[in-house]
């Protein structure tokens, strides 16, 4: 089966999973990184594909070289915090030489640029650390200009030092405002700057090469990427949602590989011998092996040792969570097994909302299916595995369960779903519309292909909706657009990302007939997709039928933020028949929505926060005056307290007072992340507090999801009380040919 993908971005959790064990990490501390021969070969192969088969074919010439140079420089130093103008001038000759570096398989210049960047970063961290010895004056009316992506390069070393002085002062002031004492502040920042240096020293030639090749790939258009061997494997796992390993999510903390969480049913959890917070300090292959000391290793190198074939033994040297640095270790052996990444699978829940109609009094049950990604195990499906992992199969099963639970409507939650398999987008849509075209593809030759499921049967023919936000992209946009174009359901939320391109995976190892993974893969744009109505989601995204407030900035997030995004265009509509018409229903739903949220304090709080965020977003500077910053912080804290009082007052008035302590805790959870700054970076917080905060966020009330459920409840009420309106929403053709879910 062809891997046709629609994907916005790639970000993968570090997890212990399967492959052949690695022997030892590449040690590069203190030495310049150099390109490997296979990387030069991979660069040349990549260029051949991009210049011949990309949807937007562009020659690799001097003009492209300048684009690559600028993007590579931006990737290295996006905020202009390390290079001074003289450093940039030093490599000015290379602006028209990047194409030659790829064509002649000589990558010495891009690696030289990286090595200078590494040197400058080391110098900046040493300078920053030295500044901590002095006392800082926060009485001046001084501002720190932190949004530097469009700033000029510092002209002199003195200007760079002034910039870093302000940056360190801001780091210090944030911690001071959070209540930290001077000694603790100094220790925290010393450790932070040292960690940055240590992390830099762990970088490998593969990291540099991938950074450079992505500068080339994204210079053509935003969604073409090069994936090195490790990134390629991570991508495969994200699509299959399965791996072979011990079932533990790992995290680097204090130079040690730490267990962040255990996967239910995995070897680590079933053993009963491991818990979050345990540190893995050694890894061995086999029960009688001697564990290799992995203290200070990169996380992915430790993961590589933990990887292995199913049913083989991995021996772990563990420093327990409650043990000090010199505490007693314990040896634990685990048998590797297949792990399913259930946290990324489709999940269902039911929200009950009160009917607003006196004639239809009661509760409406709205079934919610959250789908984080359009996943599919391509290899398992190709091999004929009847149980292959698939988003559509999982959603179909959940829909069947929701039928038995007698829900009145279904909401497909695609918020922050960045895409995935094109097949899954088409097949998932067919669960709601049956047979018919779902999306159109146009390749670089202008040929148009209509994607549809010719033998599909509707699994759910009742009222339904789709919830999207700015993070909903690609496959999510295909699904939402098709549901909207067919008149099948409501689209609720924010305008989507706007990615209307199709990618395929090119395995460079297969091209080179390499038995070992060394060349990586190319994720290349090969087509553009279009809605069945002839429009495209490219650049503009999907516009919801009922819009919610958004924190997203179109200039910094979404397709419109890219300077080389493909334009919005239109083609001839596909031949399709709508299954419903919501135009008469939408005004009524909009009025009910507006009336309800006008009296919903939580929704109004979101509107307040969105407006405040937009004001701060355009500011781009922050005061280094302590009195002014404390005043800003006090204002934010007062806002949290005021909201707590309003929430409690409402509960008392409604007779749902409950436990006041719990009420206050819930209120703080809802507002703390947006209004309070502890001055710490993620890896500086304790694991316990990090996990507690994550749990609190998951447990916090999802105001927007609840309002979406109310909107679908309103739809059910209107359809029950207005028969003529109901006849227009679902067409006779749909009603006659499809089975009823109830």
Image (cartoon, rainbow, N blue to C red):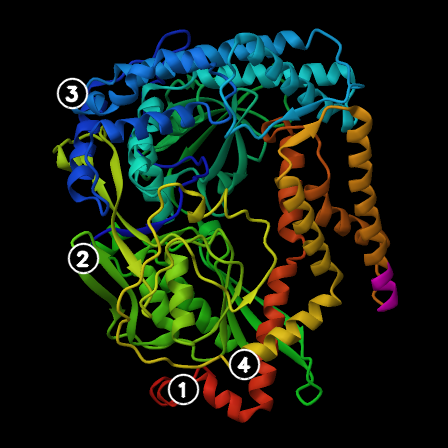
Q: What residue sits right under mark 1 in the picture? A: 731
Q: What residue sits right under mark 4 in the picture? A: 585
What is the distance, in whole Å, between disc 1 and disc 4 at their CAs?
14 Å
- Relative to the observer, which residue lies in front, 212 or 310? 212
Q: Is residue 591 above or below residue 165?
A: below
Few, some or many C-alpha atoms within 10 Å of disc 2 (few <14, some 14-19, many ≥20)? few
Q: What residue sits right under mark 3 in the picture? A: 104
Q: What residue sits right under mark 2 in the picture? A: 446
Label 2 or label 4, whichever comes before in sequence order: 2
Q: Quadrant of residue 453?
A: bottom left
Residue 101: x, y in percent? 22, 20
Residue at (20%, 33%) from the top-left corner? 46
Residue at (47%, 84%) from the top-left corner? 729
Label 2 or label 1, whichever comes before in sequence order: 2
Residue 663: x, y in percent? 80, 54
Is 575 on the left or on the right of 463, as rendered?
left
Image: magenta residue range = 649-654
What is the distance, in whole Å, between disc 2 and disc 4 at their CAs?
38 Å
């Amino acid at each position: 089966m062809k891997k046709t993908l629609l994907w916005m971005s790639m970000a993968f959790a570090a997890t212990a999973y399967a492959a052949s064990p690695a022997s030892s990490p590449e040690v590069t501390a203190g030495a310049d990184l150099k390109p490997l021969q296979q990387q030069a070969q991979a660069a040349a192969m990549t260029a051949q594909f991009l210049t011949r088969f990309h949807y937007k074919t562009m020659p690799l010439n001097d003009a492209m070289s300048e684009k690559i140079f600028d993007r590579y420089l931006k990737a290295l130093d996006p905020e202009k915090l390390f290079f001074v103008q003289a450093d940039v001038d030093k490599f000015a000759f290379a602006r028209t030489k990047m194409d030659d570096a790829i064509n002649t398989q000589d990558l010495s210049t891009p690696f030289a640029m990286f090595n200078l960047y590494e040197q400058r970063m080391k110098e900046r961290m040493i300078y920053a650390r030295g500044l901590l010895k002095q006392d800082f004056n926060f009485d001046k009316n001084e501002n720190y200009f932190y949004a530097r992506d469009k700033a000029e390069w510092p002209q002199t070393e003195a200007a760079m030092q002034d910039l870093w002085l302000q940056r360190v002062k801001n780091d210090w002031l944030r911690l001071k405002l959070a209540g930290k004492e001077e000694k603790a502040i100094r220790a925290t920042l010393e450790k932070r700057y040292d960690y940055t240096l240590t992390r830099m020293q762990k970088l490998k030639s593969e990291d540099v090469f991938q950074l450079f090749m992505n500068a080339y790939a994204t210079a053509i258009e935003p969604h073409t990427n090069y994936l090195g061997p490790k990134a390629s494997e991570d991508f495969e796992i994200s699509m299959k949602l399965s791996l072979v390993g011990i079932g533990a999510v790992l995290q680097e903390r204090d130079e040690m590989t730490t267990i962040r969480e255990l996967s239910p049913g995995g070897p680590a959890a079933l053993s009963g011998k491991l818990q979050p917070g345990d540190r893995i300090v050694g890894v061995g292959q086999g029960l009688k092996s001697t564990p290799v000391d992995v203290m200070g290793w990169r996380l992915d190198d430790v993961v590589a040792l933990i990887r292995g074939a199913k049913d083989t033994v991995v021996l772990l040297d563990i420093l327990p969570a409650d043990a000090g640095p010199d505490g007693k270790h314990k040896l634990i052996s685990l048998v590797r097994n297949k792990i399913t990444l259930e946290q990324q699978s489709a999940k269902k829940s039911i929200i009950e909302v009160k009917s607003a109609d006196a004639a239809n009094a009661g509760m409406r049950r709205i079934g919610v299916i959250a789908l984080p990604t359009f996943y599919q195990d391509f290899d398992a499906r190709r091999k004929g595995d009847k149980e292959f992992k698939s988003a559509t199969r999982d959603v179909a099963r959940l829909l069947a369960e929701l039928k038995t639970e007698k829900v009145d409507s279904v909401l497909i939650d695609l918020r922050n779903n960045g895409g995935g398999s094109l097949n899954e987008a088409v097949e998932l849509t067919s669960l709601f519309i049956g047979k018919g075209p779902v999306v159109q593809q146009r390749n670089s030759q202008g040929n148009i292909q209509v994607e549809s499921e010719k033998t599909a049967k509707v699994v759910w023919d009742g009222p339904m909706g789709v919830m999207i936000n700015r993070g909903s992209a690609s496959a999510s946009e295909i699904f939402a657009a098709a549901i909207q174009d067919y008149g099948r359901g409501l689209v609720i939320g924010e305008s989507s990302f706007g990615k209307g391109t199709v990618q395929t995976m090119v395995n460079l190892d297969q091209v080179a007939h390499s038995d070992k993974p060394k060349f990586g893969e190319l994720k290349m744009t090969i087509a553009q997709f279009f809605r069945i109505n002839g429009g495209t989601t490219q650049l503009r995204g999907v516009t919801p039928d009922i819009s919610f407030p958004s924190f997203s900035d179109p200039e910094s997030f979404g397709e419109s933020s890219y300077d080389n995004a493909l334009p919005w265009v239109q083609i001839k509509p596909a031949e399709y028949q709508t299954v419903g018409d919501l135009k008469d229903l939408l005004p009524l739903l909009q009025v009910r929505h507006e009336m309800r949220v006008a009296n919903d304090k939580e929704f109004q709080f979101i509107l307040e926060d969105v407006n405040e965020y937009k004001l701060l977003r355009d500011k781009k500077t922050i005061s280094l005056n302590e009195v002014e910053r404390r005043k800003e912080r006090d204002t934010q804290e007062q806002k949290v307290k005021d909201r707590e009082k309003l929430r409690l007052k409402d509960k008392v008035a409604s007779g749902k007072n409950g436990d006041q302590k719990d009420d206050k805790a819930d209120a703080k959870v809802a507002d703390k992340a947006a209004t309070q700054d502890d001055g710490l970076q993620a890896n500086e917080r304790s694991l316990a507090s990090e996990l507690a905060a994550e749990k609190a966020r998951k447990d916090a009330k999802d105001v927007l999801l609840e309002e979406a459920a109310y909107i679908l409840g309103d739809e059910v009420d209107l359809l029950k009380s207005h028969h003529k309106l109901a006849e227009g929403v679902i067409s006779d053709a749909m009603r006659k040919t499809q089975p009823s879910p109830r």
